[in-house]
Amino acid sequence: MRRALACLTLLLALVAAAPAAASEEHPTLAELEQELICPTCHSLLALSNAPVADRMRAFIRARIAAGDTKSEIKDQLVAQFGESVLAAPPKSGFNLLAWTLPLAGAAVAVALLALALRRWSRRRVAEEPPPAPSSANGRPALDPDLERRLDEELARYDG
Amino acid sequence: MARRGKHILQAAAVLVVALLVALLGWRVAQQEEGRGLDDALAGGERPVAPQLSFESLDGDGTIDLADYRGKAVVLNFWASWCLPCKKEAPLLQDAWERHGDRGLVVVGIDAQDLKSDARSFVERYGLRYPIAYDGNGASLGRFGVTGFPETWFVGRDGRLVGEHIVGEFDAEQLEENIQAALATPSR
């Protein structure tokens, strides 16, 4: 059973990794246009019609035709325009902060929320009035005034 | 204890906001630096030209504006995909050839451009003056450049002189500003 589960996990990992590997080895212009920024208008290359964006598209087409991988094409553009040409910062060095800080921030927010909820529920329990004394049948006792009126009505009915 | 924790959290939040505001201020100040040059020039002042040091487009060393102290400099910001830059290129090459012996240097700053395109441009127009490559356009904010072409003139004393030409210049306008730059004292 355990072996079958391990095989299934490995198979799923391979199925998930295959498109990423294919995209790395044989990138398309459309993919790269979504991952790069136009240096003059600072929008996604796919959305830019600036002259330099057209030249970048021509450059990418030429590099794809020459057989370059996605990383190689990106590296060549970074060497010319700097890292700001990438739509997402690389997952290394100082840029790693851009990936880890939002996750750390979300974790801190969840922890603070949990702490606040716990405190709030504790305070609510402390502030709740003590339960009313129960009557002989185990149910909560009636309000004394209501009980008196009920007795009077019953007495009138019996009488 | 709980109150102390609350105070620490509040202090941390204020610190983060202060840091973000400082970062924004620094960024805006950088962008405004070039705009200040225009205002100073228009007010009759001659501000010192901002520092500029980039690799040479031909890959042969670095081009540093400070190295041209004592010479008059035409600083032309361009890109190969810019149409008016094609008209300016021959005029700049001609000025470099005619006034070189009087101490004029033309420096091209190729920005936001593919290196291969820029090199083809240089080859096509037979440009022989020094050209720096500023791929990500780091120099543009410093000089208040918002498009291409734009041209500044630097006197022999390292201070800006003449006009900041935004857009294409004509031969007469170029010559006038070159003469103003050449007429500046060395110190």
Image: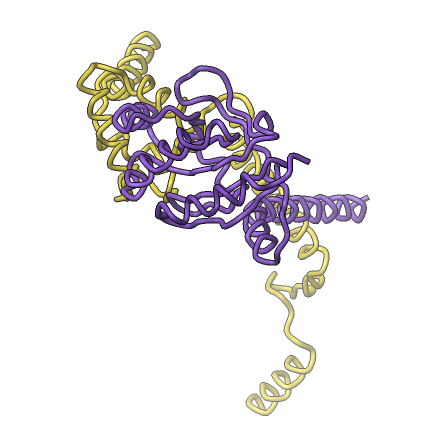
Chain colours: A yellow, B purple
Above or below, A27 against A1 in this view is: below
Nearest the camera: A152 or B53? B53
Query: Measured from the top left, where is residue A47 in percent x and y?
Result: 28, 44
Residue B108 lies, in percent from the top left, at: 42, 32
Using the image as rendered, state which of residue A17 and residue B162 is in the foreground.
B162
> Which corner quadrant holds the N terminus of chain B?
top right
Q: How many marks?
A: 0
Q: Residue A65 versus residue B171: which sits nearer the camera? A: B171
Q: Give the x, y percent position of residue B54.
A: 50, 26
Which residue of the protein is positioned furthest toward the top in this rendering?
Answer: A3
Quadrant of the frame with the C terminus of chain B = top right
Quarter occupied by residue A84: top left
Taking depth in this image into account, of A110 and A91 the one nearest to the observer is: A91
Q: Specify the quadrant of the image occupied by residue B125.
A: top left
A17 displayed left or right of A140? left
> Going by the image, does A94 lie left or right of A72?
right
Q: Which residue does the image show at 34% across and 26% down from the upper left?
A: B127
* Image: A41 above or below A124: above
Residue at horizontal 39 percent and vertical 29 percent from the top: B97
Q: Position of residue B117 (x, y in %)?
A: 29, 27
